[in-house]
Image (spheres, helix red, strand yellow):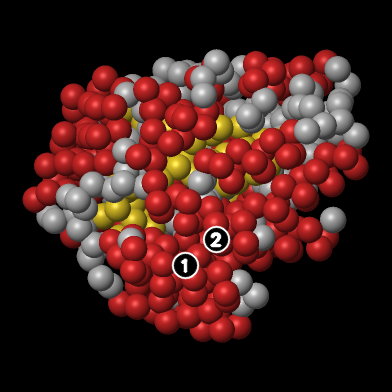
């Protein structure tokens, strides 16, 4: 069997880092970890080829040479996925599809020959067994959660790792919290399931052996879902591995805000090589947090929690949402002020949407307020339900936040504020690579000469070089990120 695995294209979004990647001559932010893992589950004798449409375009000859096309996608890739399916069907090739998009929206893909829903460790073997016997079914689904200690190593040899800005690893699935707008518990449950430390170290070894040196993103939706196991098992193993190899990777992940309550956990994460964490802060308005059942964020000083994490050597990247029923008219000003005061440089502010299967979706359905399917990108000014606030007020307020926090003046001031308070441990070793020199030269040309932020860029350049020399590479990286964020939001605002 000749299997072609295809990963659809991402639109230009906040997290695509499309414009930032050009500074280091990379094509995509992250490789398709799901497809690379699925490929490792295929029978031994199969021929496997992977095309990531974010790296290169899919050719008709790619499809013609395959016996079967396998597709996986997130909701934000829906448009590209549908085009690929139509193209494969036109060329007479059967399509097999799975992943979050198809699990949540299987009713929209009747033209897919075989839908492998939920977790592949459970449903894919059933499909492969039926395929071998010549009787594959259209739909494979389950209520069973996978034992991810059986998940194989991704087949990294199917991609060119030099095309990507970062590699990725998964340690756990599931989240102990049940925010009403989030579909993670729908897809993966509320009891965090983890791989063994041996599995994770084996994945680190495989990346290291292939020559990777740079960022590794732990894609867990809440990396600290099982804090006890992290502290006694995985993090000590990561520290040992990183120290032995002189810290070849920089790590980042997603966590809940209560990381700030655990000094030992923060110290261990920082020593293990984590230098950034994405935190869903959602809202500075307590009533909105109660509305969406954001348990770990309630009844706490969110600003102080962010500062504690930053002082522990972990950059906080924050997620914020506007559009809750309980949001006051002042919410836009409150969010912008919180972002600025916190020194959260990477602040993803989005409009509330209701993914299928969530408690929010069910409530809005019963209230007759649902409008359409969501785009999968909550920063593109779209909303799939009728908000309590007027639609015009919501969009105008949202636009005001973005224009304020990503204006060069505010953004660079925030970078400087963060760098003054950020305290990475001395143990971290900076490895100078050709990518860094490329990015520095391009940033000087694009931002320092051609960009409208040129004055702020050079002020940051010399300030960080003279007063925070260890953080100079990070300062330039954040300047580049700011350029990307502005370009993306300018594109959205121009359509609004």
Quadrant that contains the N terminus:
bottom left
Q: Residue 436 lies in what quarter of the image?
A: bottom left
Residue 460 badge: 1
Q: Which residue sits at x=78%, y=33%? A: 330
Q: Which residue sits at x=21%, y=42%? A: 271
- Left or right relative to 480: residue 370: right
The one of 442 and 182 positioned closer to us in this rendering:
442
The one of 29 and 157 positioned closer to us in this rendering:
29
Image x and y of residue 309, in percent: 38, 36
Image x and y of residue 112, in percent: 65, 45
Whether the residues at callouts 1 and 2 have beta carbons within 8 Å, the answer is yes
Q: Is residue 152 above or below residue 244?
A: above
Q: Is residue 300 above or below residue 111?
A: above
The one of 236 and 304 positioned closer to us in this rendering:
304
- Left or right relative to 392: residue 419: left
Structural distance between the alpha carbons of marks 1 and 2: 7 Å
Q: Residue 293 lies in what quarter of the image?
A: top right
To which residue does mark 2 refer? 412
Q: Which residue sits at x=26%, y=55%? A: 249
Mark 1, secondary structure of its residue: helix
Q: Is residue 108 above or below residue 1?
A: above
Residue 450 appears anywhere in the view: yes
């Amino acid at each position: 069997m000749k299997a072609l695995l295809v990963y659809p294209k991402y639109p230009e979004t906040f997290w695509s880092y499309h414009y930032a990647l050009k500074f280091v001559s990379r094509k995509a932010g992250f490789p398709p970890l799901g497809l690379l893992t699925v490929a490792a589950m295929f029978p031994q004798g199969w021929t496997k080829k992977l095309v990531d449409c974010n790296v290169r375009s899919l050719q008709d000859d790619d499809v013609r040479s395959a016996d079967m096309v396998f597709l996986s996608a997130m909701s934000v890739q829906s448009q590209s996925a549908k085009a690929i399916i139509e193209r494969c069907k036109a060329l007479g090739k059967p399509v097999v599809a799975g992943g979050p998009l198809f699990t949540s929206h299987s009713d929209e893909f009747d033209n897919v020959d075989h839908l492998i829903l939920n977790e592949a460790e459970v449903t894919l073997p059933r499909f492969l067994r039926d395929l071998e016997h010549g009787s594959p079914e259209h739909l494979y689904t389950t209520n069973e959660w996978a034992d991810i200690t059986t998940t194989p190593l991704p087949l990294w040899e199917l991609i060119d790792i030099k095309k990507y800005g970062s590699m990725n690893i998964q340690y756990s699935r599931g989240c102990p919290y049940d925010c009403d707008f989030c579909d993670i518990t729908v897809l993966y449950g509320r009891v965090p399931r983890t791989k063994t430390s041996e599995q994770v170290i084996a994945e680190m070894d495989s990346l290291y052996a292939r020559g990777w040196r740079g960022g590794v993103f732990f894609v867990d939706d809440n990396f600290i879902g099982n804090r006890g196991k992290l502290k006694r098992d995985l993090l000590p193993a990561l520290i040992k591995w990183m120290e032995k190899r002189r810290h070849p990777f920089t790590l980042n992940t997603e966590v809940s805000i209560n990381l700030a309550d655990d000094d030992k956990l923060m110290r261990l994460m920082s020593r293990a090589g984590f230098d950034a964490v994405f935190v869903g802060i959602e809202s500075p308005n307590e009533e909105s947090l109660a509305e969406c059942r954001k348990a770990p964020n309630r009844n706490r000083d969110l600003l102080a929690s962010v500062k504690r994490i930053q002082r522990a050597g972990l950059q906080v990247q924050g997620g914020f949402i506007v559009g809750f029923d309980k949001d006051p008219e002042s919410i836009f000003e409150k969010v912008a002020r919180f972002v600025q005061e916190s020194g959260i440089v990477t602040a993803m502010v989005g409009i509330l949407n209701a993914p299928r299967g969530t408690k929010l979706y069910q409530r809005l359905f019963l209230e007759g307020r649902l409008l359409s399917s969501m785009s999968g990108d909550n920063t593109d000014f779209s909303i799939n339900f009728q908000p309590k606030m007027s639609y015009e007020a919501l969009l105008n307020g949202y636009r005001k936040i973005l224009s304020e926090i990503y204006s060069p003046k505010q953004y660079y001031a925030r970078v400087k504020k963060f760098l003054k308070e950020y305290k990475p441990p001395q143990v971290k070793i900076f490895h100078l690579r050709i990518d860094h020199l490329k990015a520095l030269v391009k940033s000087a040309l694009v931002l320092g000469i051609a960009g409208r932020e040129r004055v702020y860029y050079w002020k940051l350049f010399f300030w960080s070089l003279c007063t925070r020399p260890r953080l100079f590479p990070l300062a330039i990286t954040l300047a580049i990120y700011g350029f990307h964020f502005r370009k993306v939001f300018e594109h959205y605002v121009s359509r609004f």
